Image (cartoon, rainbow, N blue to C red):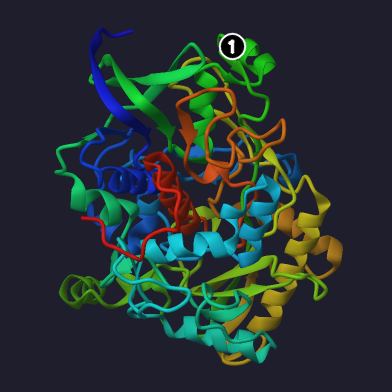
Amino acid sequence: MGAVDEVQEYDVVVVGAGSAGCALAGRLTEDPSLRVLLLEAGGSDDVLEVQIPAALYKVWRTRRDWNYTTEPQPGLGGRRLFWPRGKLLGGSSSINAMIYIRGAAADYDEWAQLTGDPSWSFESVLPLFRRMEDNARGADRFHGTGGPLRVEDPRSPHVWSRAAVESAVAAGHPRNSDFNGARQEGAGLYQLTQRRGRRWSAADAYLHPVVDRPNLTVVTGAPTTRVLVSGGRATGVEYRRGGRLHTAHAAAEVVLAGGAVNSPQLLLLSGIGPADHLREVGVDVVHDLPGVGGGLQDHPLVPVIWHTRGGKSLFRAESPSGYAKWFGARRGPLTSNLAEAGLFARSRPELDEPDLQYHFLPVKFWRQAEVDPDVDAFTAASVLVRVHSRGSVRLRSADPAWAPAIDAGYLTDPRDLDALVSGVEQAREIAATGPLADVLGEEWSPGPAARTPEQLRQSVRDTLESLYHPVSSCRMGTDDRAVVDPQLRVHGIDGLRVVDASVMPTLVRGNTNAPTIMIAERAADLIAGRTADPAPAAAVG
């Protein structure tokens, strides 16, 4: 162990400069009297692969990615799945597909019911969503302008993406031009967290504009190793940087914003979690909190892929003309987020809300981009957004340098498998209808050999992948398995909150970046003592 450096004093220490941490730092430091330290294990986001939307997968499996792998999944024949998580400023908002989705109103009403706190209902959180938005379409009941997070329509959508929308409508699904409006169900093009064809991450929105504030200190390359607890209160953190162990004291609060993997890992390393598990791995028990790391959920997807009869897929986006269009007018195929069009649908007609989400990609997306596309193809990724299966995050060792053991629990509940089979069947119906029928050729996966229900079930087990939306490993609630209360305070430890996707009581129906930022907006109000309704949309700066 390296030498211990001097002790630093702050009011609030935020661990993790991802979607939630950047939003917190931006909002909290609006109060000039509040001294905030933002710690990030990774480094800078100032790289071209982050800025160019279509290059998103090129950041995966690099030093800017935690590059996690799950435990062998029994429901998937023992396969391990790759989980990219951003290890840089902006966190996963710097490496994601930029899709701006809130989820269904019913998701937040369920949160309010599960937590017993009406401030998590949809009508209560809607002002937070409006406050954080700068939507290119303008302001209305559901959207805001002037906020830090820029939201725009795709600048140069692929013709096949528009064809996918038309085919879904032809197959009987409603058209929907705004998945974040009055209703979620239906088919349309996604709105994206971009500004003029460039990624607009949480770091771009909340951190970079205010990084020179005198009350904000940002330290990168600084993995946090432990939360310091004295007399039942979090007093600060220890972190490593430059071969030395540093201590940062927090006069008011320590806030964990590391995400659904790293936040429970840090709690466990700090002795806060299930006592039996902590003893097994050699961590002294500071506070027995059984729910830490439990209840993990993720959105599973099954790719349905076709070869195409003609035309160019995004496989050919990296061309001299593609780069010329991006560097010139910020248009062309490199502005694509790959998953340009979507659909929310039901696996069974009697369901009250959609439980399936489709990402239509005008490119072959296979094995989570481990292998570059080699032919022109089209992918309909069928995603289960109402997940019943649960997993866990556990320590492998008391050494903070060890990656945790991630058990995603895929398909441990048979209802998930049945819904995903329905998703594949509906994708095939859409592909055979409308303009897509003229574009698509032979089905490459699952292929013509998968026809019977049992063949489709086996195909789902063989091809299921992650959509990288882990949540609920530090679940919010009031029961004995909850980790934080409805104000995001860790049960049994004063001065300690968790503010990231891990606190979600359940998965939302859709991509998790926007809800995570909303949670941070709410947390900023709670920490700053603002209890009234959020103010109208206002820019951070």
The quarter in which the C terminus is drawn is bottom left
At 19% from the left and 36% from the top, the residue drawn is: 215
- Left or right: where 331 falls relative to 74: left
Closer to the camera in the image, 442 or 391: 391
Q: Is residue 209 left or right of residue 266?
A: left
Measured from the top left, where is residue 133 in percent x and y? 37, 66
Q: On screen, 196 above or below 272?
A: below
Disc 1 marks a residue whose amino acid type is: Val
| Nearest the eye: 57 or 359 | 359
Q: Please tell me which residue lies in front, 533 or 233.
A: 533
Decide: is 411 above or below 131.
above
Q: How many dots with numbers?
A: 1
Q: Residue at x 62, y 62 (%)?
A: 509
Q: Which x, y percent locates residue 153? A: 38, 77
The quarter of the image holding the N terminus is top left
Q: Is residue 443 above or below residue 10?
A: below
Say whether residue 452 is left or right of residue 407: right
Element at badge 1?
loop
Q: Quadrant of residue 366?
A: bottom right
**Quadrant hosting residue 131:** bottom left
- Residue furthest out toward the front: 532
Q: Is residue 510 visible?
A: no
Q: Position of residue 384 (x, y in %)?
A: 67, 60
Image position, residue 208 (x, y; %): 21, 50
- Near mark 1 (Cα within 10 A), the count class, few <14, some 14-19 or many ≥20, is some
Q: Residue at x 26, y 36 (%)?
A: 34
Residue bearing the label numbered 1: 285
Residue 249 appears in the picture as rendered: yes
